[in-house]
Image: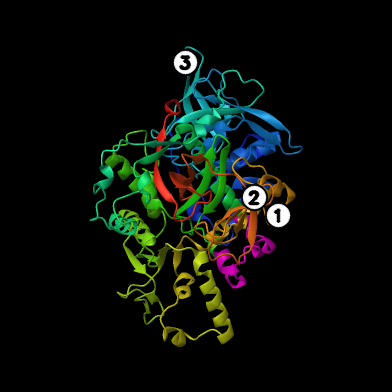
Amino acid sequence: MKAEHQPRSPARFGTVLGVGPGGVPVYSSDYATADRKELPNRQAYRHYVDGVFMGHKWQCVELARRWMFLNKGYIFDDIAMAYDIFQLRHVRVVKDGTLLPLHSFRNGSKRHPEPGALLVWNEGGTFDVTGHVAVVTEVFAERIRFIEQNVDHAVWPEGQYFSRELHTQIADDGGYWIACSYHDTEILGWVIQTDDDSHSERIADVDPRVFNLQSREVAHNGQAGDTWLNVANPEEAAYVAMMGGCRLSGNDADAYRYFRISESALKEIKRATNELHNMFMHATNHVLQDDALLRKFNLPEELWPRIHESWDNRRNQMITGRMDFSVSERGVKLYEYNADSASCHLECGKIQSMWADHFGCDDGDCPGDALFDDMVSAWKKSGVNDVLHIMQDSDPEESYHAQYMKSAVEKAGIPCKIITGLTGLGWDDRGWVVDADGVRIKWVWKTWAWETALDELRAEIADDNEKGRLTRAERMAVPPRLVDVLLRREVMVFEPLWTLIPSNKAVLPILWSMYPNNRYLLNSQYELTADLIAGGYVQKPIVGRCGHNIAIFDRNNDLVTETAGGFDNRDQIYQAFFPLPKIDGRNVQVGTFSVAGTYAGASVRVDPSPIITTDSDILALRVVKDRDL
């Protein structure tokens, strides 16, 4: 077999391509050929051996973990991306929980790979976003062989016991180098369970002080009085109209202010975003397997089947979400995941960079520069094959948000129309909801949250139940309701209905129970506990928006501060109080954006109050090298 990758005809999903050492089968992961009857939902794609979760069928990480489990009796913990394996420092013996050392060796290391080592590729190119991992089976001076999933989907030739082999060479200094057959990516190296750390990667502990954000100001040269946003662009015009001028901050005192974050801190919040997104997906699946847990979310039971259907439909992937963090030398801690109807995309992906250009801020780089292109890429992969309707209400913030998303959708080659409210909606002769031009609404992206509409949906569902199902003629005799659009089976909505689960704060105690003491999570409970009181806590409604109806209590159980709002009649959760860093009199919260479940950008919101709300200012964030702090 040649070292270069030789594509062959793909086999049907789940076909055994071959059997590796230790009798471990390697499966085809050609998802296009997956049988929906055999694999009707996401739960069906989760693979367990002896009750231990291996991963998702049949991805590269699943094979690596399964090979370790079956041959060695240990596994590595769940990770967000395959390339994260290179950063792991231990494996866990399943039988007794013992931790064994794991060491990584960079490509070219004098410690050569060995059978059973994990070969790890970096993210990018062919392995964009995720990276890749394979299990080494044979090592020679001039070649290396391994088994892998989710690259080729073809059955191995008769008599072959490996997926691929790559050319290798031993350098004069004894270093072992592996040539990657893909020109657009690289092999990071290999990971070995061993007590001997000779020649392994030395990952120095990062000084926690580099996680402290810094406040800076650019020189005051009157830039704040200039016009620097182009109102010929719809999203910028809508933004200027909402802000009352060309400004990033609503506070004149902060017109020249920006914040700095180190490369190490950005790397950590990127990793946190990716890892936490996967954890939220696991928690969502867990909730949807247990009606008792789902009941804690106070979602109308009439919607439960539709939520399950939404989750089970593999096309229903998220486009964007936003996580809110506290970032400082005390650590990186998540407050919540706005998995549905996240805001501030324009500020992160465009306005903060334009601010820096106009105000002459050349300190570091903008962490939002990739957001727009990532959104375009996500829409290209979304499966939308007709007009996408963006549905918004008349809120000015939603207007510029809608316009910005529209530009990404159209850049992806998808025709797009914005609908404000329900004005102009009607019915065609086949019972489809149509826009004012008679175009059927088949694909929707919305700016407001599902939860915002739930009270209306509850009332409409109850009304329908009381009156019985209306006939088609009766329904078409009145203008379409919101429910007639969003819950129509033929309409695909982004963000999908299942995002009601990760967006609801009722998921936070479940996450804590599934991942206790995870370094990114805060202790969260349905009931107030002595531990929470002892350290101070935050009381939050399980549903809510914009920081409304949040209360902070100190260690004496005395109220420190609270916000008003319309969600005070909702069930509550209790979360350990972990204050935002206060810098120059401003509490600073970092928001990271996920696109298609992967980190795509970051920005900051600031406020004199420890509770960030929709009225809190957004300022520019710049990424600088650790040494420049």
* Residue under pointer 2: 537
Tag 1: amino acid? Leu
Residue range in magenta is 284-309
Q: Secondary structure at mark 3?
A: loop
Give x and y (percent) for residue 577. Answer: 62, 47
Give whichever of discs 2 and 3 has the lower sequence position.
3
**Residue 209 place in picture, x, y as percent:** 53, 30
What residue is drawn where x is 45% and y is 43%?
8
Please state which of residues 600 and 241 is positioned toward the viewer in this rendering. Answer: 241
Q: Nearer the viewer, mark 3 or mark 1?
A: 1
Secondary structure category for the residue under label 1: loop
Q: Is residue 228 magenta?
A: no
Give the residue type at disc 3. Ala
The CA span between labels 2 and 3 is 58 Å
Q: Which mark is residue 528?
A: 1
- Secondary structure mostly seen in magenta is helix
Q: Earlier in the sequence, mark 3 or mark 1?
A: 3
Kindly report the distance in space between the C-alpha atoms of the residues bearing marks 1 and 2.
Answer: 9 Å
**Left or right of 322 in this view: 410:** left
Q: CA distance from mark 3 to mark 1?
A: 61 Å
- Amino acid carrying mark 2 in the image: Tyr
Query: Which residue position holds label 3?
Result: 171
Q: Nearer the viewer, residue 518 or 51?
A: 518
Q: Nearer the viewer, residue 613 or 43?
A: 613
Q: Is residue 400 left or right of residue 474?
A: left
Instruction: For marks 2 and 3, give the one nearer the viewer.
Output: 2
User: Does residue 156 appear anywhere in the picture?
Assistant: no
In what element is the residue under mark 2? strand
Q: Are marks 1 and 2 in contact (CB under 8 Å)?
A: yes
